[in-house]
Amino acid sequence: MSPAMTDHAADLLLANARLVLADRVIERGWVAVAGGAIVEIGEGKPPERGEDVTGDVIMPGLVELHTDHLEAHYVPRPKVYWDPIAAVVSYDGQIATSGITTVLDSLRVWREETVKSADGDAVKLAHAIGAARDADLLRCEHFLHLRCEIPMPGVVEEASELITRPDVRLASLMDHTPGQRQFRDQAKLRTYYRGKTGGMNDAELDRLFARRVELQKLNGETNHRTIVALAHQHKTPLASHDDTTAEHVAEAVRDGVAIAEFPTTFEAAAALHQAGIRVLMGAPNLVRDGSHSGNVASRELAGAGLLDILSSDYVPSSLLMAAMVMPEVVPGIDLAAAVRTVTKTPAEAVGLDDRGEIAPGKRADLIRVHRGAVPVVRCVWRQGRRVA
Ligand SMILES: [Fe+2]
């Protein structure tokens, strides 16, 4: 019996596991948990009888920095708004069964004229997340990611209201003005907006796009400076979004961003990574092998060693799928490295150093994964407590 286990009897002992550590995989091992933390790991058979996980993979609970999937539960049909707490609870269930134990709920902190969706309901949703958390209704640990569409009127006011919340862990600087960044391709932009707006015609889209260009001219620079200052003042980590050019990279460096979300070109990703900014790419892009907006492929960046973090973006289950498939499709990436992109690296990027790794002293946020045609999450523990 090891000293750690004699001192404190294990609350949970998982045996016969394929353990994914931060830098290697133990093909057959065990992990002991006590008081919500990992206390010991080992190879072969455990010192006591544990729960036999029959050779399934045990890895850290996934850490998701950018998912807007709450919106799908809150606005399940165009213009149909579900009870926000019920939406948070059902969304949380889906996030947990996707293997995610820590999630930054991405909220759009602006309202787009003429577009009816979750835009501008950030305060209401943040309140619902807080209420559900306080009532112990949630399986995952939830934080907020404030998505700031910089040119929008009202974005500074709404961000100022929200950023004082202690659960805000990230703010991103976005600019989806037509012709820019993610939306350099006007045809893709039109397809995207038609889906989002429930079928605007070309003349309506022309008016909307002209308005967006006008707003960027009016507000872009001032809002950008103000939001960056606000984030620094509140010590909120910042993310840049859809960086495309050398100018965007220089701006990200100047702004002191911690994370670059979805750079759209290989050149931008390389320069950002070189500058010590963690490059975050979409897991759906990696699984599908291509970007829905026609931008750079996650696999290409991963193969070049430029991909630091994966995010499930709009498909929660894609995070685990991408981590499991990456060693097979990206030369030079083993399972431990793939899993780091969805656990340790995102956790550290937003200052959550207590999790994201199977190691003594870390939080016992663990998932059991069975490999079938697709990976299936069999069990989820948060701080040693079974939550799914
Ligand atoms: Fe974008």
Image: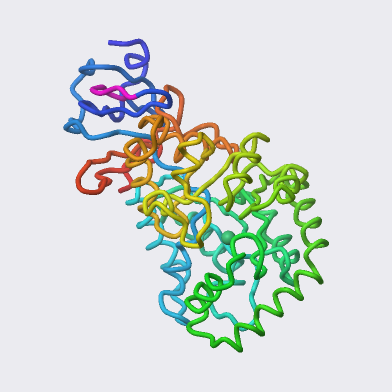
Q: Position of residue 191 (x, y in %)?
A: 50, 75
Residue 208: % across, % down: 65, 81
* Residue 89 in the figure: left or right of residue 346: left
Q: Camera-side residue: 132 or 252? A: 252
Residue at image location 61% in from the left, 37% down from the top = 273
Q: Is residue 184 visible?
A: yes
Q: Indicate left or right for 252 with 30 as reference.
A: right
For the record, the magenta segment spans: 25-31
Residue at 55% in and 80% down: 116
* Residue 152 in the image: above or below residue 386: below
Residue nearer the viewer, 366 or 300:
300
Q: Does any portion of residue 381 appear in the rendered image?
A: no
Indicate whether residue 27 is drawn in magenta: yes
Image quadrant for the N terminus?
Answer: top left
User: Which coloring applies here?
Assistant: rainbow
Overall secondary structure of the magenta stretch?
strand
